[in-house]
Image (cartoon, rainbow, N blue to C red):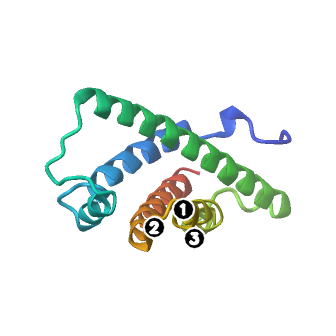
Amino acid sequence: MAAGVEFSDLDWLAIVLAIVANMALGFLWYSPKFPTGKLWMQEKKIPADMKPTAAEMGRAMTLMVVGSFLMFFVLMHVFVAFRDAMTLDDASITDISYADGAQGALFTWLGFFVPVLWTGIAWEKESWRLFFVNAGYYLVTLLVAGMIFAWRL
């Protein structure tokens, strides 16, 4: 086993599946027809009848795909490194369990997403309601990605 994680060690299909799941979840979660979407629009003071232009949607979609790729690329890297470290301790471990996927997602959310989202409350005067909408979205999307990665790894 080579030291470190190589690009060939990553499951690229799992990354793509996580991106697609993240986008589907985002469309649902932030949809004006979904309670969290209504709350998000209310907290961001976005009129219910506001329709973004095609250019705005294209820009937003591009940024979402690139951001999702970066997030899931790094998360996959961490999962593979974790799996490889477990294998060094116990050669009988060859994959990541669903519990490992959930735990990795939960700790990633708790250690990296929650503190960043708190910054919006601390410095940008965002509401706790907005925090819970966004934090909930990232928790669910990371848990889904963790399950996909566990399934594939």
Q: Mark 3 or 2, which is nearer the eye?
A: 2
Q: Quadrant where the N terminus lies? A: top right
Mark before the other along the chain sequence, 1 or 3: 3
| Left or right: where 147 falls relative to 94 | left
Residue indicated by mark 2? 131
Location of residue 32 in the rendering, given as x and y in whole percent from the top left corner: 20, 57
Check whether the beta carbons of the residues at disc 1 and disc 3 lie within 8 A of each other: no
What's the residue at 69%, 56% (across, down)? 94
Secondary element under disc 2, as helix, strand or loop, is helix
Q: Quadrant of residue 54?
A: top left
Secondary element under disc 3, as helix, strand or loop, is helix
Residue indicated by mark 3? 99
Mark 1 residue crowding within 10 angstroms, few (<14) / some (14–19) / many (20+): some
Check whether the beta carbons of the residues at disc 1 and disc 2 lie within 8 A of each other: yes
* Residue sitting at the far left: 49
Mark 2 residue crowding within 10 angstroms, few (<14) / some (14–19) / many (20+): some
The numbered dot on residue 117 is 1
Kindly identify the amino acid type of the residue bearing the numbered disc 3.
Ala
